[in-house]
Image (cartoon, grey):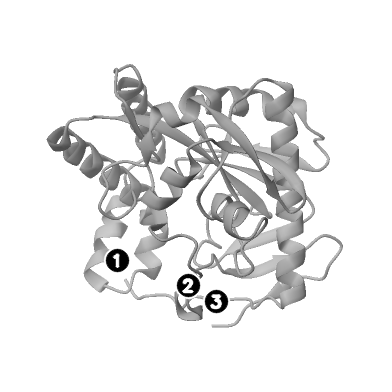
Amino acid sequence: MRKKEIKIAELSKEQLRELQMIQLDILLEADRVCKENGIKYSLSSGTLLGAVRHKGCIPWDDDTDIELLRSEYEKFAKIFDDATDSTKYYFQDADNTPGYRWGYGKIRRKNTLWLRSGQEHLPFNQEICIDIIPLDKVPDNIIASRFHNLHCFIIRKIMWSEVGKYYDDNPFYRILYCIMSKIPLSSVINHYHRFTEINNKKDYKHIRFMTYPTPRGSDHNGEIEWYNSFTELVYEGKMLRTITEYDDYLRQKYGDYMTIPPENERRNSPASKFQLLDDNSTEGKV
């Protein structure tokens, strides 16, 4: 299968900042719903890093993430649409959206657009969003953990196959992804749910985000006990929740996280076409 070229729509600094403010609005809505319904969440990944290092969005970042233990995630997924303003927001994941291929959820902001580069052909709505990430238990034993991570890797690649078959640089992998994409998505999602359910019944002490790589050199994303104690940090002038042990989390994930990376190492999630609130759409070029 011939590789398709990726389109990227460039955001101006002003547009990026507006995007971040739309995501902040979504994040504040998620925070409200969680606090009003006793759901425990934490800022995560670059969003948590931004809170600690910049007291807000990382200047070049276009992602916003929160994490919840699986039990809290399921509560959130069940109530969010009924607890929010349905003219503005909605929750999206593999259980309520045909063709959705990720092992985590998103809150979307209606009347916007954010077509991820390479994912334009996927059969579901893609508005500006924040990621809602479930954390699941993983084996504490090193050998068992390695097999578990291999299992997670295979699930992740099957989910990704509908994108990889068009956009992976390696022609062999594109063929392999094409074969994997024939596996019924419903079977993959059902297997993923059974896999997480089995592991979450165990008395494990470690957790991970199942369908995303773990930090380099680690077989997990952290300790389950981290998600028993919470504090708040300033984020764009608002007080938002994070785990108390955020320093341990960030050191495991990023190492020397207070050092700002050079420009060539600053990563984002480009779109091929976007539309901000009350704004004209912008489409990228190959």
Q: Position of residue 19 (x, y in %)?
A: 72, 62
Residue 33, given in percent of the width and then of the height, sits at 72, 29
Place of residue 208 in the rendered image (x, y in percent of width and height, measured from the top left) = 37, 38
Please tell me which residue lies in front, 164 or 98: 164
- Residue 230 numbered tag: none
Tell me residue 42's x, y (percent).
Answer: 57, 37
Residue that mark 3 sits on:
7
Amino acid type at circle 2 is Pro
Foreground: disc 1 or disc 3: 3
What element does badge 3 sit on? Answer: loop
Furthest residue in direction left, as rendered: 143
Residue named by callout 2:
261
- Residue at image coords 21%, 44%: 150
Q: Which mark is in front, 2 or 3?
A: 2
* Distance CA(mark 1)–CA(mark 3): 18 Å
Relative horizontal placement of residue 247, taking residue 57 as reference (left or right): left
Question: In the displayed structure, does residue 275 sit left or right of residue 45?
Answer: right
> Counting residues from the N terminus, which is met first, the one under dot 2 or under dot 1?
1
Residue at mark 2 to residue at mark 3: CA–CA distance: 25 Å
Q: Quadrant of residue 186?
A: top left
Q: Which disc is residue 174 wearing? A: 1
Amino acid type of the residue tagged 3 in the rendering: Lys
Q: Give the mark nearer the N terminus: 2 vs 3.
A: 3
Amino acid type, callout 1: Arg
